[in-house]
Image (tube, rainbow, N blue to C red):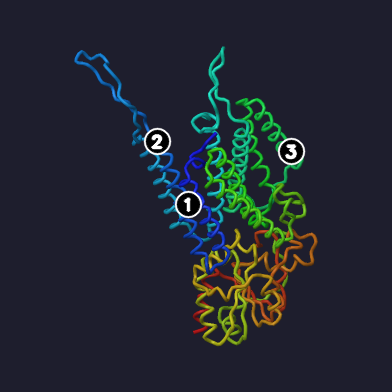
Amino acid sequence: MEHTASVNPWVALAYLVSGVCFILALRGLSSPATSRRGNRLGMIGMGLAVVTTLVTHLPVQTVGLVLADPSGAIAATGPLFARIDMLTLLEILGAIALGAVIGLTTARRIAMTAMPQLVAAFHSLVGLAAVLVACAAFLNPVAFGIAELVVPMIGQPFAAIYPVSRIEMTLGAAIGAITFSGSVIAFLKLNGSMSGKPILLPGRHVLNLAVLGAILALIAGFYETQAPWMFWAITLLAFLVGFLLIIPIGGADMPVVVSMLNSYSGWAAAAMGFTLGNSAMIITGALVGSSGAILSYIMCRAMNRSFLSVIAGGFGAESGGASGGEAIDRPWKRGSAEDAAFLMSQAEQVIIVPGYGMAVAQAQHAVREMADKLKAHGVRVKYAIHPVAGRMPGHMNVLLAEANVPYDEVFELEDINAEFAQSDVAFVIGANDVTNPSAKTDKSSPIYGMPVLDVEKAKTVLFVKRSMGGVGYAGVDNPVFYMDNTMMLLADAKKMTEEIVKALD
């Protein structure tokens, strides 16, 4: 089986350059300071891959010259030549243009608060694309170059799919289907359309293992027999597995789920790259799959979660479900914007801890303005970012970068946690779970063992929250609210921050 990339060195070179761009893009995205360059390199690499694939796979029609005598009878046929099938080409370009319009429109209109939902939705589309490509390859394998037409002595001709392509095709369909249905559930949970609490089905572990075992058995059977019903059964069961794996996972683990589904979408693309004989898809899919898996592992360590437990679909969710969902009725102190402005203006160092509440209120620009005012008063300002703050990896970093917060003022948990004890004020804006000290002491808490920001060690904690009635995404109350050194600032995060800015003037 030969593919274009294997016989045309220029195509192989173009895909290689594209792969290098993707690697450099990932390198650039490792730091906010180089993220723009990384994005540009990724766009260049993808553009090069798309153009190369389009040019080398232009739809052509074979046309022959027919010569006729005056009577209309065919006298001779001329040489055959190929011409571009313009109708098919226009259909391809139209599909690309439609996708570009959807992507541009979505990117311009989507709010930063909905970015996690957008990522989950896009992951679902990648998975669905892999399934559709696998289905197309199965229905017409000869056109994809993964089969040879067999003409038996008796019976109808049939396409015998190459054995290795049967594995690639079924794996691509299975991983893609899991990615699609799992991403849909993640989207519904992130969007609030479904409860963020774990939905624990009875005997779910046995059921998951049984369905996964059936999929593997069917893949082996399809490898041996190429039975059509097996391919469709694999696809349908994989859709079911994606649903079963994600619904037991609680909201506290949702950032890991988003990263994990990102990894799945990469492996699905890589599998279909083998089916299509496209090295660019293989490289890109492998990069996305491996980087997503590594990120998921790092985040699991940051949350004290078992990596295998999370990817297996909520193993141990009995202890990781949302509990204690009601706020505790205990005394607490309420402050005003003027109180907060006075305390911070008199401080030597203020550490700002952003969370999802800041994203919901779109208060990042007001926070940066507040920080600028404080620095004008001679106050040192730093930002503390928890690895899983928000609803997706890097959510807070993106928001702060959007507000032009200097990169050298932003610190990760392990770099700044020791400084809270020497800080005058910790200004927490909508970050509940990642500042909850119960994670260090309460073994019954769903976030027990997760490293948290030690905001309670600051001399004063200013906690911006809409009301005392709500709890964090993990569904647990935060004891910091009721500590003697805590002052609750109950209001919309953006409105409260803007009032503090006015008070600082």
SS at circle 3 = helix
Mark 3 vs mark 2, CA separation in Å: 46 Å
- The vertical placement of 61 against 318, above or below, is above
Sequence-wise, which precedes: disc 3 or disc 1? Answer: 1
Q: Quadrant of the N terminus?
A: top right
- Residue depicted at x 58% and y 50%: 187
- Comparing 47 with 326, the one in front is 47
Determine the image quadrant of residue 441.
Answer: bottom right
- The vertical placement of 153 against 198, above or below, is above
Sequence-wise, which precedes: disc 3 or disc 2? Answer: 2
The numbered dot on residue 46 is 1
- Crowding at label 2, few (<14), some or many (≥20) Cα neighbours within 10 Å? some
* Residue at mark 2: 59
User: Is the residue under label 1 in contact with that under label 3 (CB below 8 Å)?
Assistant: no
The numbered dot on residue 302 is none
- Crowding at label 1, few (<14), some or many (≥20) Cα neighbours within 10 Å? many
* Residue at mark 3: 207
Mark nearest the camera among 3 and 2 is 2
Q: Residue furthest left?
A: 70
Determine the image quadrant of residue 209.
Answer: top right
SS at circle 2 = loop
SS at circle 1 = helix
User: Is the residue under label 1 in contact with that under label 2 (CB below 8 Å)?
Assistant: no
- Residue depicted at x 64% and y 55%: 254
- Residue depicted at x 72% and y 46%: 200
Q: Position of residue 263 (x, y in %)?
A: 62, 50
Sequence-wise, which precedes: disc 2 or disc 1? Answer: 1
User: Is the residue under label 2 in contact with that under label 3 (CB below 8 Å)?
Assistant: no
- Residue depicted at x 74% and y 69%: 437
Mark 3 vs mark 1, CA separation in Å: 39 Å
Which amino acid is tagged 2?
Pro
